[in-house]
């Protein structure tokens, strides 16, 4: 009887060891997937914080320049249409950058408070995912639309400043700003396409990792049932 019971105990011990190994491996896979999700959330938080900081600095700088230019420029013997274009462009420029600055000022302190907490689960308390649309809007207003308006503002300001003194100087400044604006638009489109491609590659890689983890969990569950 002892000879028969010994293999049974050995088989039971082998199954127990396999079950413990499966539990440990499943726990490690679960912790790895949770850690990957939290790492992705922290990455989004830091990226949102960087966007808000960059947009706030850019908006404060460019809107301040536009206000100073509007106050300091000498408006003598300037056509009425040019004055209207200058006032409209300056108002749009300041309004767009102040809107981006307001969004950054309202959201950034909440993200900064969470980013300084040394706790992995604290990232879920940050509003960066729920307010991602506002963050992207502030980023777009400050870097894309705001810079385009700033280039237009420089062109109109050159016309206002040099119209009474040198018509050729105003034409020369316009001839310089136009290719710079085209280069800016080309770079913005190229950067956006590369960024979308990078996000697509990272998403595909993340889906492949999730499929691998799901396959391993399914195989381990099948081994346990057997």
Image: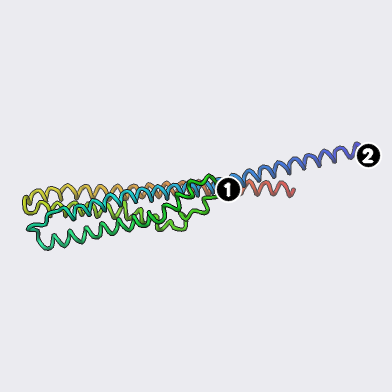
Could you say which is closer to the camera, residue 196 or residue 65? Answer: 65
Q: How is the image coloured?
A: rainbow
Image height of 84 relative to 161, above or below: below
The residue at 44%/58% (across/down) is 131
Q: Which mark is residue 34?
A: 1
Nearest to the observer: residue 102 or residue 35: 102
Query: Would you say the residues marked 2 and 1 are in contact, meaning their CB atoms lie under 8 Å apart?
Result: no
Q: Position of residue 89 (x, y in %)?
A: 21, 59
Question: Position of 159 compared to 189: left or right?
Answer: left
The kind of secondary structure element at disc 2 is: loop
The residue sitting at 89% across, 40% down in the picture is 5
- What residue would you read off at disc 2? 1
Q: Locate residue 123, reporting x and y percent.
A: 51, 50
Place of residue 49 in the rendered image (x, y in percent of width and height, measured from the top left): 42, 49
Viewer-nearest of discs 2 and 1? 1
Residue 176 x %, y %: 17, 47
In the rendered image, the quadrant that contains the N terminus is top right
For label 1, the crowd category at 10 Å Cα-Cα, with few meaning under 14, some 14 to 19 and many 20 or more, is few
Q: Secondary structure at mark 1?
A: helix
Give the side of residue 167 with respect to residue 118, left or right.
left
Q: Residues within 10 Å of mark 2 (few under 14, many from 20)?
A: few
């Amino acid at each position: 009887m002892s000879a028969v019971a010994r293999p049974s105990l050995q088989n039971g011990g082998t199954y127990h060891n396999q079950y413990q190994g499966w539990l440990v491996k499943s726990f490690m896979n679960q912790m790895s997937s949770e850690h990957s999700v939290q790492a992705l959330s922290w990455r989004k938080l830091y990226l949102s914080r960087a966007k808000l900081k960059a947009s706030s600095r850019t908006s404060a700088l460019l809107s301040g320049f536009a206000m100073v230019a509007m106050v300091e420029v000498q408006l003598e013997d300037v056509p009425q249409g040019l004055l209207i274009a200058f006032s409209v462009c300056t108002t749009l420029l300041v309004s767009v950058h102040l809107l981006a600055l307001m969004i950054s000022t309202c959201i950034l302190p909440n993200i900064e408070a969470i980013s300084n907490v040394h706790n992995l689960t604290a990232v879920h308390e940050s509003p960066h995912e729920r307010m991602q649309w506002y963050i992207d809007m502030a980023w777009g207003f400050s870097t894309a639309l705001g810079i385009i308006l700033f280039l237009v503002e420089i062109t109109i300001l050159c016309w206002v400043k040099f119209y009474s003194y040198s018509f050729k100087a105003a034409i020369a400044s316009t001839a310089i700003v136009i290719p710079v604006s085209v280069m800016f638009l080309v770079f913005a489109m190229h950067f956006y396409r590369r960024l979308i491609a990078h996000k697509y590659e990272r998403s595909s890689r993340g889906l492949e990792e999730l499929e691998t983890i799901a396959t391993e969990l399914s195989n381990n569950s099948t081994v346990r049932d057997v």
